Image (spheres, rainbow, N blue to C red):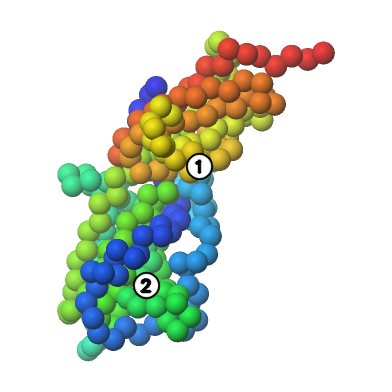
Amino acid sequence: MRVSPIAIAGGPIGPIFAAVLSLLPSGPAPAQDASANSLFSGAPASGGLISPSGGTPAEVFAPGAVLAPAKAPLMLPSAAAAIPMVPAGQVALALSARFGKDAPEIGGGLTWRIFAAKPDASGNFRLVREDTSPTPTLVLPAGPYIVHVGFGLATAVRPVNLLGPTVHQEFDLPAGALRMEGRVGNARIPAAQISFDVYKGSQFEPGADRRPIAEHVATGNVVAIPAGTYYIVSNYGDANSVVRSDIRVEAAKLTDITVTHRAAAITL
């Protein structure tokens, strides 16, 4: 198993807002964009997967973009954005995220979403603002909000009360990534003949969740996930050869996994 630095993109939404709401101050909700749709009830737009097929760093960090394997890290500290002019009654919200307390700022691949602090008449939390810059500064009416940041399948949510003129919020996203391939002996299994499912926890853990967090992952694709323990199920051929492996994904690192199958395709 080989470990190397990473930069990855994408971001679904995590359904963990009930606990966040209990931390919000009481009072009227801030102004909202009436044209924005609620994102709380919708399915994630991305599974956190990136195919390695090239692109510049700017393209890599765009939603739905692709990532080329590289020897040098693509994750670079980004320069702090200049604070824009803030009209009366508005507050500048400066956002940033790190892989951990002592890590540099995440330089791309983030999706920021700002939601109203209270649901509307239909029970939905309306999206107020969305941004994919690594360190955006958003000017919003003063008041309480919910800030959500996504990086692949890793997410964080925090209530924020905007009281001027500028509020700085830094999020910790201990996320890593996983890339897999299969082999028979020294021969690499063709991508069309093998796929991988990823599960949270250890396969030997009693009561572990048996629902995959990523399914049918192709060889070479990158899955951005929170740091932790996972197990993968490698399916080679038409369910003829299955291998299960426990793995550990570290924050800010790409973990390369090679699964060896003791089987081969037969042509009759």
In what element is the residue under mark 1? loop
Instruction: Check disc 1 and report the residue beneath it.
Output: 211
Dot label at residue 12: none
The residue depicted at 35 percent of the width and 78 percent of the height is 118
Q: In which quadrant of the rendered image does the C terminus lie?
A: top right
The residue depicted at 39 percent of the width and 32 percent of the height is 206
Residue 61 in sight in this render: no
Residue 172 picture location, percent across and down: 25, 52
Q: In which quadrant of the rendered image does the N terminus lie?
A: top left
In the displayed structure, does residue 194 sit left or right of residue 256?
Answer: right
Q: Observer-nearest residue: 134 or 154?
A: 154
Residue extending furthest toward the right: 268
Q: Determine whether 251 is above or below 248 in the image.
A: below
Mark 1: amino acid? Arg
Tag nearer the camera, 1 or 2: 1
Q: Determine whether 183 is above or below 49 in the image.
A: above
Dot label at residue 115: 2
Which tag, 1 or 2, sits closer to the chain's start? 2
In what element is the residue under mark 2? strand
Mark 2: amino acid? Phe
Q: Determine whether 179 is above or below 85 in the image.
A: above
Q: Quadrant of residue 255?
A: top left
Q: Quadrant of residue 265?
A: top right
Q: Observer-nearest residue: 257 or 248?
A: 248
